[in-house]
Image (cartoon, rainbow, N blue to C red):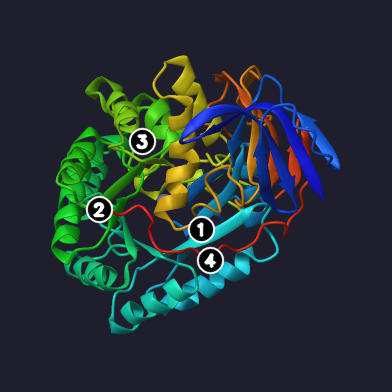
Amino acid sequence: MSTLIKNGLVITHAGSFEADVLIEGEKVSALGARGSNWVTDEVIDAIGKYVVPGGIDVHTHMELPFGGTFASDSFETGTRAAAWGGTTTIIDFAVQSKGSGLMEGWEAWMGKAEGKCAIDYGFHLILSDVNDQSLKEMDIAIGEGVSSFKMFMAYPGVFYSTDGEIFRAMQKAAENGATVMMHAENGIAIDVLIAQALERGETDPIYHGIVRKSILEGEATHRAIKLAELAGSPLYIVHLSALEALAEVTNARDEGLNVFAETCPQYLFLDLDDLGNGFEGAKFVCSPPLRDRAEGHQEALWSGLATNDLQVVSTDHCPFCFEDHPELGRQKRLGEGDFSKIPNGLPGVEHRVELIYHGAVTEERLSLERWVEVCSTTPARLFGLFPRKGTIAVGADADIVIFDPKRKHVLSAATHHMRTDYSCYEGMQIAGGVDSVFSRGRLIIAGDEYHGSKGDGKYLKRELNQHLV
Ligand SMILES: [Zn+2]
């Protein structure tokens, strides 16, 4: 099977050029000047459109057990929604349960994803029980293509690790080359503030945003950086939301440390006010929380993306239904009368590529090349998938999005493909949109039609971080 994508503007992290793209089998086999006369099975005219590498979302939680329920998207529904939005690879989080082996978590999540995914997928591992055995198993995980391990300074009693446990894991990572990913919020202090708020009768979702102070994200980010510096391991801060945390990452990078960070569309587009309006605010409960716009976090994050103090945009896709669901039961409403019991997480995997494009062009915040870089190229490099993924080049997987800058559309729960009953961006008009999507050479989205099927996506064995200084 061969396909010619002709007349498009090819955009990679390195530049933009008018070119025809030849796909043979699963790979890009040639790039040529416009008007090339290759003979192929299929020809797609991309005149007036952008031809970009498929999006890579390195932070998703399909079917994650959390707060007495499960994230509402399965690997089947979540990866299909991702494809609709121009994402052709996800890296999800397999979870080690306390008291179980690390690799048991990986095997369990491999089982959940097997035969279900519409697009290619890999895993990080959540290291929640640090002991001699799980530290040894980090080496085994790397052999299976899991080169990154997430730890939590938040959620005491659930995923939380002490500074000592974190430091031990970082020492191990310094030895085997793994990247430690950190949820950086001071969960111990936050729990004190939660208890005090509830005692005062402050139970609405807005208080979730008020007690999880941005200074406590800054503090935890600082601590994680110092521990990683001492241990000598690469560090990746997940879902950075606060300007205090960004300042820490910026300083560390200026010092030449291997410190990286992602932010998410919700921290760029939404804010603390969304958590208001009574229990409706539960739709916007995630951690770290949406921040106060007046404090300047959103502006700081956009600048950080432009200056490469932030390197990646991921989604932290972890959807729950607002209203009780016939199969999934009670989800967001578990937290009625107590904000601390609202499952943390937002739907987002479908909208990242389009939202960042929208922010990039409507406010002239990022170049088109930078849009591609933060949504695809750098995620591929940091998590060991480049140049197979993350660019359009001869020999790369033909994961390609044809993006139409004129395809204006409105985001809504009525039209999205994620398995959740609301949209955080209800009614928002987007400046452009995904036209077609290829996953390893197969056209899986064509206009308003889905041509893929579950099981098309393959497990990706990843290399170590390819972006170290
Ligand atoms: Zn997450």
Say which element carries label 2. Answer: loop
Residue 352 visible at all: yes
Say which element carries label 4. Answer: loop
Q: At which x and y percent is residue 139?
A: 38, 77
Q: At which x and y percent is residue 228?
A: 20, 60
Amino acid at pointer 1: Leu
Say which element carries label 3. Answer: loop
Amino acid at pointer 3: Asp
Label whose residue precedes the other's in the sequence (1 or 4): 1
Check residue 204 in the rendering and tell me which mark sits there, or answer none: 3
Residue under the point 73% across and 56% down: 454
Along the line of sight, which residue is nearer the eye, 109 or 250? 250
Determine which residue is flagged by label 4.
461
Determine which residue is flagged by label 2.
258
Q: Which is closer to the viewer, label 3 or label 2?
A: 2
Determine which residue is flagged by label 1.
64
254 on left or right of 29: left
Label whose residue precedes the other's in the sequence (3 or 1): 1
Q: At which x and y percent is residue 259?
A: 25, 50
Label whose residue precedes the other's in the sequence (2 or 1): 1
